Each structure stands twice: as structure tokens, then as C-alpha cells.
Amino acid sequence: MTTFAYTAVALDGRAIAATHKAASRAEAELALFAKGLRNIQLTEKKSLLQAEVFKARVKREEIMHLSRQLGAFIRAGLPVLDAVRTLGDEATNTTVRRMMRDVEDGLRRGERLSDCFDRHPDVFPEYYRGILRSAELTGQLDSVLEQLARYLERDLEARRKIKSALIYPAMIAVMSVVTIVVLVAFVLPRFKSFFASLNATLPLPTRILLATTDFLTTWWWALLAGTAAASLLATLIVQTEGGRYRRDQFFLAVPVLGPTIRYTLVERFCRILASMAVAGVPLPEALRVATASLRNQVFIRALGRIGEAMLRGEGLAAPLAAASIFPPTASRMLRVGEDTGTLDTQLEATATYYAGELEYKIKKLTSLFEPVVIIVMGGIVGFVAVALVSAMYGVFGQVHV
């Protein structure tokens, strides 16, 4: 049995606040309604043993499925309140279940769906809530929810491709590091004792290797402390606006990686701006929300100036081309959209074009990352092997002279 706290109004107009035990939320509402109570608001109460120590995180994949199911229910003619209740009952994630209960309570109070989602900004991004708000005004809630689900699916697919492409190089890097640690910690100290007992002159590579091993085994704690201090300092620096701007500026300037990041931002910006424009969001507001979703200070600052220029009547494409943050192709495609009055269509076409380009950039980036890792780690292991073999031959030669 679950305990529900409730507020309700009796038939004589008295306000009542109490608790009621029932097997489910629906049974509790029926029992209270049978008692002559109206305007019932239920909140599930948890005991100390039931309380969650850690709040379950809501994954983007869950939001995608939630959007798709909610849109399908509304398209099938199910009232929003019933659709939200059904999704809450079926949710396996406790955070999602609790969130949907809160949304249901808000809908019962007469709030709009977007207003209810506004109370959960950690789950629903600002662009999601802005598009949803405009969809409610235009009566396109079902189609917009499906559109949001498709956008989230494309975003998840891009992330999945990057992760899968990095698995093999990451495994190589981990195994190489493990090999080096075993050599430094266990193998090389024994060779050092062996070479010292022969009192022979060692080749230069071997001396370098043994000196490096001595330094690492003696000062490992200082290296760890220095790494931790540098990481903490870097974290503190990027907490500032200037630090974040310099960090983003640096990554955009890195060969191969920079263009990949730029194409990612362009695709995301155009996709969100197109979705908001189709949903009927005013272009200045859509531009503000799409800009905030990028989380890249270089783009955010530049697009902020573009927003000011647009409010002065300069349009979108011309200031965008002057800012030089978008590739020339994107600026030209948006200019065509402005000139022909099909900006939303051109934004979607631009996003689709750069989604394909982004996939190519990701493949190129990961294909370069793999051989770099192999070369670096192979060079380190190879140097260790050469140092040991040359030492063995050198000592052997000196002993038989």
C-alpha cells in the first residue's frame, strides 16, 4: 500500500488536507471521490526506507521515447492528462515517474504542458520547452513532439557513432599503459639489479630508460600531486567566462578536431532554429534559445552580436557571414532562404547537409586518432625493447672481451 498526501474540497466547501492509503493513485482518487471530495490533488509520500539516496538520472534516450509516445497518444485522440498519466504509470525510472506525477498535477490545476515541463529544466532543455510552448499555441503538439523525438534520435545516433569509433583506440591505449606500468614497476627493476652486478657500461638508450624508471618510481607521488593541482587549476579557470572562451577558442583552432566541432555546432544550431521557426516561435526568441543550446562561448558571443544586428533590421544571413563563424556554404544557403521567404526550409536543409558532413568529419577524426595512439604507444614500448636488447648485447660483448 502507498500513502498519498492529498488536498481536496468537500461538498460543503471546506478545504481538507490529509493522507490516504491505496494500492495505486487511481484507486486513491476513486476512494476520495466516493467520499464526496472534489478538486483532489494527490502527492505520493515516501517513508525513510523508501527515500532515494541518489536521484536517478534521466537519459536523453528516455526523453526521446517519452516525446514519441506522448505525441502518438495525442495523435490518437487521447487527452493530454490521460497520456501523461499512462506514461507515468509505465515509467521504470523513478525520476521520470515522479516528474510525470508532477506534470499530471499541474495539468489538473489548469496549467499547460509546457508550463509543467518548465519546472524540470534539468530534464527538458530550453529549446525543447520553447518549441513545445509554440506548438501548444498553434495546435501542432503531436507533430512537434514527433519532430523533437527525431531530433533527439539523430543527436543520440551521432554520439553513439563517436563512442563506438573510439572503443578500439581506447582499448589499445589502456593495454599499452598497462604494459608500460608492468615494465616500469616489475621488469625493469630486476634488469637494473642484473646490469649493476655485471659492472658494465650500458648503452645510452638503456641509461635513459633506467633513469626515467628511477625518476618515476621515486617521484610518482609528486607527479600525481602536480597532475591533480594542474587539473584543479584548469577546472577553476574554465569556470570563468574568459576561461571558457579561451578553451573553446583553442579547441576550434585544433586541426581536424576544430572543423568537427564547428560542423557539430552549425548542425545543432540550424536544426534547433528550424524546429522553432516551423513551430511558430518568433525568430529573435528562436535565435536566443538556439544560441544558448550550443554551450560554446565563441559561437555564443558571435551569435549574440548577430541577434543585435538582426533586431536592427540587418537580417540573419549577412551578419552571420560577416561573423565568419559559419562555413561560407551555410551562410549562402541561409541567404537564399531569406531572399525567397523559405528560411525554415533552408535551415532544415542546411542542418541535413552538415549532418552528412559531420559524419564524414567524425570518421576522419576517429581514423586519425587510432593510428596516432598506435604509433605513440608502439614507440614507447619499442624504445623499451630496444633499450633492453641493446643492453644485453652490450653487456655480452664487454664480458667476452
Image (cartoon, grey):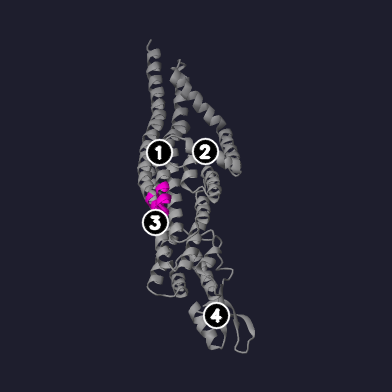
Q: Which mark is residue 209?
A: none
Residue in view at x 56 percent, y 84 percent = 38
Q: Earlier in the sequence, mark 2 or mark 4?
A: 4
Label 1: which residue?
Answer: 175
Q: Secondary structure at mark 2?
A: helix
Q: Amino acid at mark 3?
A: Glu
Q: Secondary structure at mark 1?
A: helix
Q: CA distance from mark 1 to mark 2?
A: 33 Å
Q: Is 47 or 242 nearer to us in this picture? A: 242
Pointer 4 with pointer 3, Cβ within 8 A: no
Q: Which mark is residue 21?
A: 4
Q: Secondary structure at mark 3?
A: helix
Q: Residues within 10 Å of mark 4 (few under 14, many from 20)?
A: some
Q: Amino acid at mark 4?
A: Lys
Residue span colored magenta = 334-349
Q: Which mark is residue 249?
A: 2
Q: Magenta span: helix, strand or loop, mainly?
A: helix
Q: Is 258 or 339 nearer to us in this picture? A: 339
Mark 4, mark 3: which one is toward the viewer?
A: 3
Horizontal relation, residue 37 to residue 73: left or right: right
Q: CA distance from mark 1 to mark 3?
A: 33 Å
Label 3: which residue?
Answer: 153
Residue in view at x 50 percent, y 23 percent = 211
Q: In the rendering, at what x and y percent does residue 112 appear?
A: 52, 70
Residue in view at x 41 percent, y 44 percent = 330
Q: CA distance from mark 4 to mark 3?
A: 40 Å
Q: In the rendering, at what x and y percent does residue 269 appear?
A: 46, 50
